[in-house]
Image (tube, rainbow, N blue to C red):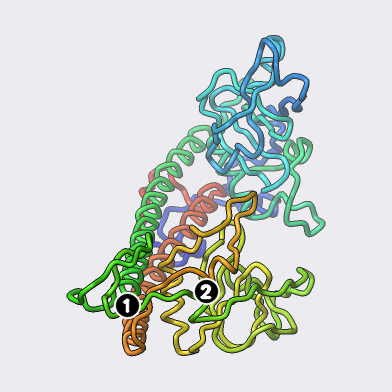
């Protein structure tokens, strides 16, 4: 029985049966393998071919066929959304289309990324940037086993080009020459079935925990929104504000514009070459910390608001000396002690809704300055800040705990696949358990 808790290969292997004898595979990424497993270059077990190059002159015609690109092939998943079509003549169909069970491997990008075609569309073509793998005639190999083997090979960096590049390029020649360990067909099928079952269980657990994280974050935001717009006393008299997102607020609260409470300015541009992995001062962009540099633009306590793209409206607190990039709006409260309260208020406001619709959505500083917000008396501000710090810390601690469990499950999943595919454990009669 194996439990997930930050896995190392030896810990996992101790919970399973091992093969009786091992030998050196003489393949660096494989290491030792069961004595009876065979090592062979892929060319001796699988037929490899590439698809048809996109021809813009053939996107119309009498034989239009949807076709897959490398962007459509993810790990163990093929997206069928918005597939383009190309004219593929009847005589080319067998050569340039896929059939159920074909393994498609991407050339370029994330090395070895692959998935098995399940036949959702027939016929369906594939692009020149994809390798189609089929067991050779008479071969009894199991493509699902090879999928897992490719995943492990990629994870272990076996497609590295020797130049230190992080993006390998598994060309047809490299792929055909790549050496894998092949157990018998019975073992290949048992391994594929075992891993399908166990990774399915792990993925189910991860999905449940991710839903829990989502619910906790929703609860956190609802708690903040309630506190900064309604206060902590549910029985206090209220009045309407006429502000759509706000509704009614406590009757004794004021309604003021942000520019009356703070100063707002865009951050300062910084060249990417000036940002390092370590350094004297942190650099903050629209999504928080993005590196370090030798100078600073601000010091003290400030709020940073993401001003562009998908991070538009995201709020962070920055303290001390730091560089705020042009991707952030820097908000400085008139009263430094109000940074926590004002940060919570901005988070509840969903500032993204005020972005300007464009190819690259963005927030205009002048528009932010004129937004009206509810302002309680100073003692209530402090009480709200104290309440939210206490309650959000509890939720954040739960989120951190669940996120750590997700990470351990992911590590277990990776370690399990690697151990099984390389023969470190024998799964013919194994029953795994994950919690």
Q: Is residue 287 left or right of residue 338?
A: right
Q: Within 10 Å of the Cα at label 1, are there few (<14), some (14-19), or many (20+) other Cα atoms? A: some
Residue 263 - label: none
Residue shown at 46%/76% (left/top)? 343
Which badge, 1 or 2, comes first in the chain's sequence? 2
Q: How far across and down, in percent of the image, does residue 279 sit?
A: 71, 82
- Residue drawn at (58%, 76%), measured in percent from left and top? 264
Query: Position of 414 compared to 390: left or right?
Result: right
**Quarter of the image holding residue 213?**
bottom left
Task: For marks 1 and 2, give the CA distance.
Answer: 18 Å
Residue matched to label 1: 391
Residue behind mark 2: 316
Viewer-proximal residue among 389 and 383: 383
Tag 1 near tag 2, CB within 8 Å: no
Against 355, residue 240 (above or below) is below
Image spot of residue 271 (x, y percent):
78, 70
Considering every residue shown, the one lying at the far right of the view is 163
Say if 158 sits above or below 4 in the image: above
Left or right of residue 419: residue 374: left
In the foreground, 324 or 210: 324
What kind of element bears circle 1? helix
> Quarter holding the C terminus?
bottom left
Residue 50 in the image, given as x and y percentages of width and height: 72, 29
SS type, badge 2: strand
Residue at horizontal 55%, vertical 18%?
122
Position of the N terminus, as image quadrant, is bottom left
Residue 94 pos. (x, y %): 66, 16
Q: Say which residue appears at 47% left-offset and 83% top-offset.
A: 339
Residue 142 can be seen in this image? no
| Badge nearest the viewer, 1 or 2 | 2
Whether residue 336 appears in this view of the structure is yes
Instruction: Tell me if residue 390 comes above or below residue 195 in the rendering.
Output: below
């Amino acid at each position: 029985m194996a439990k997930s808790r930050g896995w190392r290969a030896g810990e996992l292997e101790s919970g399973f049966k091992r093969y009786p004898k091992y030998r050196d595979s003489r393949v660096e990424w494989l290491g030792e393998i069961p004595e009876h497993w065979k090592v062979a270059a892929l060319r001796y077990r699988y037929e490899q071919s590439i698809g048809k190059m996109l021809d813009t002159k053939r996107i119309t015609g009498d034989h239009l066929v949807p076709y897959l690109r490398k962007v459509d092939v993810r790990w163990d998943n093929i997206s069928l959304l918005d597939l383009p079509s190309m004219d593929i003549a009847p005589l080319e169909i067998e050569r340039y289309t896929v059939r159920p069970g074909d393994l498609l491997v991407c050339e370029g990008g994330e090395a070895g990324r692959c998935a098995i075609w399940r036949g959702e569309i027939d016929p369906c073509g594939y692009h020149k940037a994809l390798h189609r793998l089929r067991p050779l005639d008479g071969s009894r190999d199991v493509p699902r086993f090879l999928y897992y083997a490719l995943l492990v090979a990629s994870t272990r960096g076996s497609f590295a080009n020797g130049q230190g590049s992080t993006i390998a390029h598994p060309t047809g020649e490299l792929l055909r020459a790549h050496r894998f360990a092949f157990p018998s067909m019975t073992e290949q099928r048992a391994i594929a079935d075992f891993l399908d079952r166990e990774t399915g269980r792990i993925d189910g657990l991860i999905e449940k925990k991710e839903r829990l994280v989502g619910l906790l974050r929703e609860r956190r935001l609802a708690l903040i929104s309630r506190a900064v717009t309604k206060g902590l006393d549910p029985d206090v008299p209220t009045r309407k504000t006429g502000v759509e997102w706000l509704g009614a607020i406590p009757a004794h609260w004021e309604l003021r514009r942000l520019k009356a409470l703070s100063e707002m300015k865009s951050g300062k541009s910084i060249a990417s070459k000036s940002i390092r992995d370590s350094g004297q001062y942190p650099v903050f962009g629209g999504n928080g910390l993005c590196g370090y540099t030798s100078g600073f633009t601000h010091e003290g306590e400030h709020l940073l608001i993401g001003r562009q793209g998908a991070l538009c409206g995201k709020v962070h607190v920055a303290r001390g000396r730091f560089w705020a990039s042009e991707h952030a709006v820097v908000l400085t409260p008139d009263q430094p002690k109000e940074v926590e309260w004002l940060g919570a208020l901005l988070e509840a406001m969903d500032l993204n809704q005020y972005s300007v619709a464009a190819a690259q959505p963005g927030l205009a500083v002048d528009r932010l300055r004129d937004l009206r917000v509810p302002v309680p008396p100073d003692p209530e501000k402090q009480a709200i800040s104290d309440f939210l710090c206490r309650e959000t810390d509890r939720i954040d601690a739960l989120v951190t705990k669940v996120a750590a469990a997700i990470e351990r499950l992911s590590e277990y999943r990776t370690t399990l696949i690697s151990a099984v595919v390389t023969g470190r454990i024998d799964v013919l009669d194994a029953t795994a358990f994950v919690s």
